[in-house]
């Protein structure tokens, strides 16, 4: 978590456009993914969808 905060601070200092919400944290990741790396936690999947939507909105606005 500290690394994410440090990265956000660095990106902000150089004026990068970052999407910080919603935050996505997958707790107990050893039980939330299949052997093939497929995420199975519905809550985390919803958060990731929200984050991808926010990125898409920001990218479209920048065009």
Image (cartoon, rainbow, N blue to C red):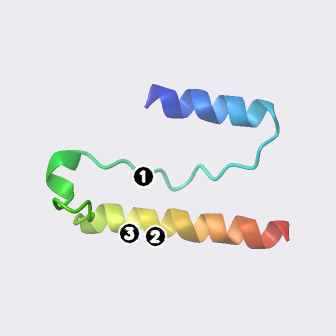
Percent x, y of residue 60: 76, 73
Location of residue 12 by image quarter: top right
User: Is residue 33 placed above or below 17 in the rendered structure?
Assistant: below
- In which quadrant of the rendered image does the N terminus lie? top left
Mark 2 vs mark 1, CA separation in Å: 10 Å
What's the residue at 67%, 30% (across, down)? 9
What's the residue at 57%, 71% (across, down)? 53
Q: Which residue is mark 1?
A: 24
Mark 2 vs mark 3, CA separation in Å: 5 Å
Residues under numbered marks 3 and 1 in contact, where contact means CB atoms less than 8 Å apart: no
Number of the label disc, if any, that sits on residue 46: 3
**Going by the image, does 52 lie left or right of 35?**
right
Residues under numbered marks 2 and 3 in contact, where contact means CB atoms less than 8 Å apart: yes
User: Looking at the image, is mark 3 or mark 1 earlier in the sequence?
Assistant: 1
Percent x, y of residue 59: 73, 67
Assign a secondary structure to mark 1.
loop
User: Looking at the image, is mark 2 or mark 1 earlier in the sequence?
Assistant: 1
**Going by the image, does 25 lie left or right of 57?**
left
**Going by the image, does 50 lie left or right of 60?**
left
Q: Which residue is mark 2?
A: 49
* Label 3: how many Cα within 10 Å (few below 14, some 14–19, many 20+): few
Residues under numbered marks 2 and 1 in contact, where contact means CB atoms less than 8 Å apart: no
What's the residue at 65%, 70% (across, down)? 56
**Going by the image, does 58 lie left or right of 46?**
right
Assign a secondary structure to mark 3.
helix
What's the residue at 26%, 60% (across, down)? 37
* Label 2: how many Cα within 10 Å (few below 14, some 14–19, many 20+): some
- In which quadrant of the rendered image does the C terminus lie? bottom right
């Amino acid at each position: 978590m500290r690394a994410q905060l440090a990265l956000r601070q660095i990106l902000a200092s150089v004026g990068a456009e970052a999407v910080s919400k919603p935050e996505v944290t997958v707790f107990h990741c050893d039980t939330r993914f299949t052997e093939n790396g497929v995420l199975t936690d519905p809550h985390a999947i919803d958060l990731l969808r929200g984050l991808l939507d926010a990125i898409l909105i920001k990218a479209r606005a920048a065009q």
